[in-house]
């Protein structure tokens, strides 16, 4: 009977006018919320003068100057010197010469971006890899003080990063890990692993034990059953967890700014200190921000179905 | 006869626990092998530094003078933290920030989730669009909002003056002691409302249709349905969202540090920013360690009490 109602009848389906109003309001919010982001992207294509014009310019002549300034350093030269040079070979050279400058070298943006990539991917692989093993053990085996251990793992996330930054700094100096990618990978893994264990335990709890039992009756060892039966079943959970770990490591700032200065510095502490002539070079900052967003945006769009599960920290079962 | 073959044959004949013990590692060994590395990394990079922080909090150590003599000072650091008026001002600032960000995010986030749950055409697309701000790096966001908030050329002031007629350069979001606390609340709300929205949405979707159908049969009005079914059933989810946002915003550092770095004066100086100033600008390592422990105990204690309340609501 209840089945009949829910398929044939629609007492709980909103009316078309309700839907229309709901759609309008949500659309309105989305547009307002996305304006700052669109502004960042637009500013990346403005000239420094257009970026700080009043009133703010929506229509402007787009230029790649911001992106050039992001990747290159320039030096000011006299008009005669520039006129004597051979023809500009790249677009950035042309842009710089129009402003009486020549390209002098490249900035640190690319190495910082690369650091972000290596550290984010490395720590995600490590924390998800270790997390899935621990989650499996917590889900399947009798472990003394299991609940206490799980709460302990979660509580490590409540610490303000700055609270442990000094001892970590001192420790890393002793171990030769300060300002290294390996040090940052280990650090971010430690922060992410609590989330990974909790999320993945939720997913693995939902995989029936009977699958592994059946596999083991068929002659698999426990390890084989874990690799060949449980891991494929947990793919969704692993992907969702990886997204969250990746987003955290990609965006992290506090540890990065306190513990890295050169070698292993990631992009978030670098972008705000891009300085042009006379203060912050906003088009270059905007360009750096935009490029930094691209991987996460692409990821979000492709993985949006998994986000809902991950966001509730495994505390919510559907 | 080969010993492994014996093991294999007996494995097929014997019950499961014995079999797996014979053919591979025992479950016990696997359990510790699987949990071991996680515990090791947490002990090394979370617990050990925390213990170190606790130890430092009882000393007069200064990280910028590693060769100075380190003296134990007992609980002096804790006494001075708890009696320092600046610390209490920072706590009040943090409380103000926490209260308003959580309130605004819950109200807007829940409303959005409720609207999205009306399943209008294209709601998937709009939901994805709304999610974008929470994917961004808080530091980069803070830095960029400083640009949007500029009184002369910033988009925010321009938009406000366009809508309200107030001249754009007549107010400074980041420069005024009255408006700066709201400037950080606006950015945090902009960034994290989608997160609350997602949690509320999963709550709304977990309510089975038949409950509404039963209510409809009983001729309960839509308003009554909302207050007697929707709200109570979403409440645990909303409380979960409050917990997550509460913990995160209690630790808030990156976005505010880049947007205002605590100013003007100390009007937006949240606890974490005070902590960073004491630790990395004044280099009062012992004192800041004590403050860090106080903060950690506060979050830990409040989260514990809160989780108990949450479980009570869930099991009601």
Image: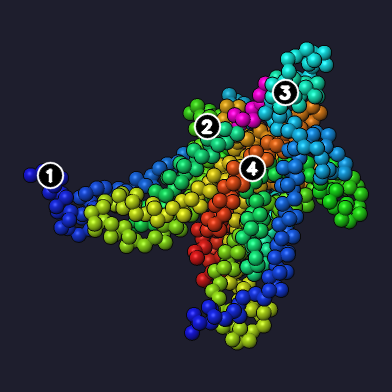
Residues at marks 1 and 2 touching, judged by CB atoms closer than 8 Å: no
Q: Residue A93 bears which disc, if any?
A: 3
Mark in front: 3 vs 4: 3
The dot on residue A181 is 2
Location of residue B256 in the rendering, given as x and y in whole percent from the top left corner: 71, 44
Q: Is residue B162 left or right of residue A140?
A: right
The structure's colour scheme is rainbow
Q: Which residues are magenta?
A: A105-112
Is B283 positioned to the left or the right of A119 in the image? right
Q: CA distance from mark 2 to mark 3?
A: 33 Å
Instruction: Give the spatial CA distance, label 3 vs label 1.
Output: 75 Å
Give residue B69's quadrant in the image: top right
Task: Give residue A101's position: percent from left, percent from top.
Answer: 77, 21
Same chain assignment for discs 2 and 3: yes
Residue on which disc 1 sits: B3
Q: Distance of mark 3 from mark 4, alpha carbons?
A: 26 Å
Q: Is residue A127 magenta?
A: no
Q: Quadrant of the N terminus of chain B?
A: top left
Mark 2 or mark 3: name the one nearer the start of the chain: 3
- Circle 2 — which element? helix
Contact flag, marks 2 and 3 (Cβ < 8 Å): no
Is residue B2 at least partly visible in the picture?
A: yes
Residue drawn at the location 64% of the way across and 62% of the way down = B122
Chain designation of label 1? B
Please state if B78 lies on the left or on the right of A52 as rendered: left
Are discs 3 and 4 located on one and the same chain?
yes
The residue tagged with tag 1: helix, strand or loop? helix
**Which residue appears at 61% of the width and 64% of the height?**
B200
Closer to viewer: mark 3 or mark 1: 3
Q: Nearer the viewer, residue A120 or B63?
A: A120
What is the CA distance from the residue labelled 2 to the residue labelled 4? Answer: 21 Å
Tell me which chain the residue with mark 3 is part of.
Answer: A
């Amino acid at each position: 009977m209840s089945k009949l109602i829910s398929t044939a009848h629609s007492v709980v389906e909103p009316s078309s006018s309700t839907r229309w109003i709901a759609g309008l309001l949500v659309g309105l919010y989305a547009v307002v919320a996305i304006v700052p982001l669109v502004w960042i992207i637009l500013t990346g294509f403005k000239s420094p003068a257009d970026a700080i014009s009043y009133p703010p310019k929506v229509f402007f002549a787009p230029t790649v100057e911001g992106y050039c300034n992001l990747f290159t350093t320039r030096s000011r030269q006299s008009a005669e010197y520039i006129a004597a040079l051979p023809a500009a070979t790249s677009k950035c050279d042309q842009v710089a010469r129009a402003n009486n400058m020549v390209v002098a070298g490249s900035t640190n943006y690319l190495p910082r971006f690369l650091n972000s990539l290596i550290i984010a991917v490395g720590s995600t692989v490590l924390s998800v890899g270790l997390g899935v093993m621990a989650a499996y053990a917590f889900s399947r085996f009798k472990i003394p003080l299991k609940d206490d251990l799980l709460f302990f793992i979660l509580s490590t996330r409540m610490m303000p990063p700055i609270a442990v930054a000094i001892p970590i700094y001192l420790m890393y100096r002793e171990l030769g890990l300060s300002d290294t990618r390996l040090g940052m990978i280990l650090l971010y893994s430690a922060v992410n692993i609590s989330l990974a264990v909790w999320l993945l335990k939720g997913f693995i709890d939902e995989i029936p034990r009977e699958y592994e039992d059946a596999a083991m009756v068929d002659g698999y060892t426990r390890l084989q059953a874990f690799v060949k039966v449980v891991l494929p079943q947990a793919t969704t959970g692993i992907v969702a967890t990886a997204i969250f770990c990746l987003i955290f490591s990609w965006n992290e700032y506090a540890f990065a700014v306190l513990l890295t200065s050169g070698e292993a510095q990631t992009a978030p502490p670098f972008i705000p200190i891009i300085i042009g002539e006379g203060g912050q070079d906003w088009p270059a900052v905007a360009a750096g921000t935009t490029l930094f967003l691209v991987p996460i945006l692409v990821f979000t769009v492709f993985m949006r179905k998994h986000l809902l599960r991950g966001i509730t920290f495994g505390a919510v079962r559907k | 006869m080969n010993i492994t073959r014996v093991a294999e044959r007996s494995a097929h004949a014997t019950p499961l626990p014995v079999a797996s013990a014979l053919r591979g590692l025992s479950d016990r060994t696997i359990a510790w092998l699987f949990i071991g590395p996680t515990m090791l990394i947490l002990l090394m990079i979370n617990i050990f530094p925390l213990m170190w922080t606790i130890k430092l909090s009882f000393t007069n150590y200064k990280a910028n003078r590693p060769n100075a003599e380190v003296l134990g000072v007992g609980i002096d650091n804790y006494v001075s933290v708890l009696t320092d008026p600046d610390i209490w001002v920072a706590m009040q600032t943090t409380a103000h920030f926490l209260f308003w960000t959580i309130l605004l995010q819950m109200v807007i986030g829940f409303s959005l989730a409720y609207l999205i749950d009306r399943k209008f055409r294209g709601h998937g697309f709009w939901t994805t669009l709304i999610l974008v701000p929470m994917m961004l790096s808080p530091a980069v966001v803070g830095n960029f909002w400083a640009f949007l908030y500029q009184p002369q050329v910033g988009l925010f002031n321009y938009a406000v003056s366009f809508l309200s007629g107030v001249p754009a350069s007549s107010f400074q979001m980041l420069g005024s002691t009255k408006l700066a606390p709201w400037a950080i609340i606006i950015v945090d709300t902009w960034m994290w409302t989608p997160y609350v929205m997602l949690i509320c949405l999963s709550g709304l979707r977990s309510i089975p249709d038949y409950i509404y159908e039963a209510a409809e049969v009983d001729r309960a009005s839509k308003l009554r349905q909302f207050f007697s079914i929707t709200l109570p059933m979403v409440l645990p989810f909303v409380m979960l969202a409050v917990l997550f946002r509460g913990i995160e915003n209690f630790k808030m550092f990156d976005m505010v540090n880049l947007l205002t770095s605590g100013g003007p004066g100390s009007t937006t100086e949240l606890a974490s920013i005070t902590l960073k100033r004491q630790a990395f600008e004044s280099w009062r390592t012992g004192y800041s360690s004590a403050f860090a422990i106080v903060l950690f105990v506060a979050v830990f204690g409040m989260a514990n009490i809160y989780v108990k309340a949450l479980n009570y609501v869930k099991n009601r």
